[in-house]
Image (cartoon, grey):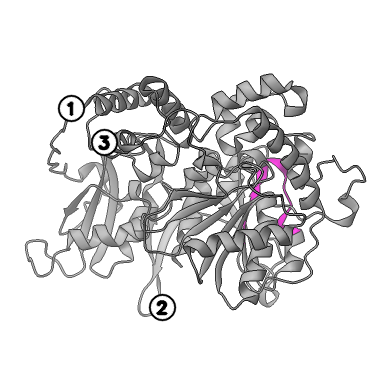
Amino acid sequence: ARGYTGRADLSAERFVADPYAGADGIGAAGGRMYRTGDLVRWTADGVLEYLGRTDFQVKLRGLRIELGEIEAALLEREEIARAVVLVHDEQLVAYLVPTHGPVDDEAAGVDEAAVRAGLATVLPSYMVPSVFVELDRLPLNASGKLDRKALPAPTVQAREFRAPTTPVEEIVAGVFAEVLGVERVGLDDDFFALGGNSLVAVKTASMLRKKLGVEVHLPWFFDSPTVAVLADRISSSETVPGTDSRGFDVLLPLRSGGTASPLFCIHPVTGLSWSFAGLVGSIEPNRPVYGLQSPALSGERELPSSIEEWASLYVDEIRRVQPSGPYHLLGWSMGGEIAHAMAIQLTDGGDEVALLAMLDSHLASDSHIEKDSHAVTEGATEHRGTAPTLADMLGGLGVQLGDTPSLDELDRETAVEALQEMLLPVGRFDAEQIDRVVAGFVHSSVVASAYRPTDRFKGDVLYFSADLDGSHGADAWRGVVEGDVEVVPVAVTHWEMTSPEALRVIGPVLDRRLKS
């Protein structure tokens, strides 16, 4: 079996890429494995020990969480013999049985601070339990299986509520409460912990701008997610509407803090990278995340005439913040081609590329090249016509707009007005910039369709495919890399690859790969 009939979403979840397919004569390349949902581990004497199920999925503050994934991370620790995670009063609670018990023996107990810190390095922050309960043993029912209902209620110490005091804090808290549907929001409440995501952040930023009369940029929500920090960021900003264009810079900081090697995200053919901001919540807090955007947005330099020239420009940009490897690259659509060329240039220069990942990037063949210089031949854009729709311009953040006209179907004034309203959280579009963006789209499409790698990347590729489009874009990349191409199907379309639904699949996989 290769999937469920008529259930692409369930197929993508259960039938995953087989990392062993084609190796040593085992199966055929491109094969699938079935994810059973059982959790096991090897014992010291080589026996598989069954630990339970991993398919207990819950929704907490708007985020889907696999409890089994948290339990598996806990069981990786030597001091923990058994672990169960539940949701209690809107908090994640971890029940632990120490390896060397009993729990009343302080020397044999579990260091909660160390466990919490360890989990933070392998799980997104929203998946780290708030409460830990140590037990001598887990309760079992008559069948010998875990009795979750018999687990004791945790003793939760309520956090002191700090009310907003300044006018800006009150406005930020009020908008958070309104947009997220929360009754009371305090200074220490985190936008994403309350259920926010990158789509909601766009709306929230627009509302704050209207109420406060100053620019509020989308990346601020990821660097400054609490009411107190965001309000201070807004108060200390001297920007006024129309003067801040940082959202259009070639190098866009989505999270600049952290000591781990950064993740660099390269734009699709539309040129914008800020929809990658939705990844920040899934990537370990210690890792900076940057977007790379088309020079067409700022108009400060001519557009490169080839993918190799684009890659050279971006290599120079990322070396400004990370002079040497290991480098981690993620490209969406055309961005995958640029990332591939960057990886080759970096390794040829003696640097390590530890991760080359792609979001549904297509490598065009000679038969795909159109004679018309205005044709859009990039694999994914064939689904959407020869010019981006307004939703496409927003990348993954535009999917909620539904069907919107393409830019070539709008007159200049209407397009400018519509995009100015939608893109206020990032910066302001003027008429001249709209012209540059549309011209940049056409230019980028032709450049992307002409990319024919002359060298092979000496490494592996992690490829996320748009399963609802029936994407087979990974096949072409196998001939231009020396390592493996691992395919992770995502049950969305090409232009939804940075939507919250897609990033719930992509984010944890990326985070695990970055840590490995």
- Spatial distance from mark 2 to mark 1, Cα to Cα? 60 Å
Image coordinates of residue 453 in percent, x first then y, are 77, 65
Identify the mark at residue 355; answer none if there is no mark. Answer: none
The magenta span reads 462-475
Label of residue 165 in the image: 1
Q: Secondary structure at mark 1?
A: loop
Q: Is residue 78 above or below residue 277?
A: below
Question: What amino acid is found at the position of numbered circle 1 in the picture?
Answer: Thr
Residue at 77 percent across and 54 percent down: it is 305
Q: Quadrant of residue 96?
A: bottom left
- Find out whether the residues at labels 2 and 1 contact each other: C-beta distance under 8 Å: no
- Mark 2 or mark 1, earlier in chain: 2
Of pointers 2 and 3, the one earlier in the residue sequence: 2
Closer to the camera: disc 1 or disc 3? 1
Question: Can residue 1 be seen in the rendering of this structure?
Answer: no
Q: Along the polypeptide, which appears first: circle 1 or circle 3?
A: 1
Most foreground residue, 231 or 60: 231
Does 199 appear above or below 293?
above
359, 408: nearer the viewer = 408
Give the residue pinned by disc 3: 189
Location of residue 409 in the rendering, given as x and y in whole percent from the top left corner = 77, 23
Q: What residue do we see at 72% from left, 62% from top?
A: 308
Helix or strand or loop: what does disc 3 sit on? loop
Q: Residue drawn 75% across and 38% down?
A: 439
Q: How far is mark 1 from mark 3, CA to CA?
A: 14 Å
Q: Which residue is mark 2?
A: 46
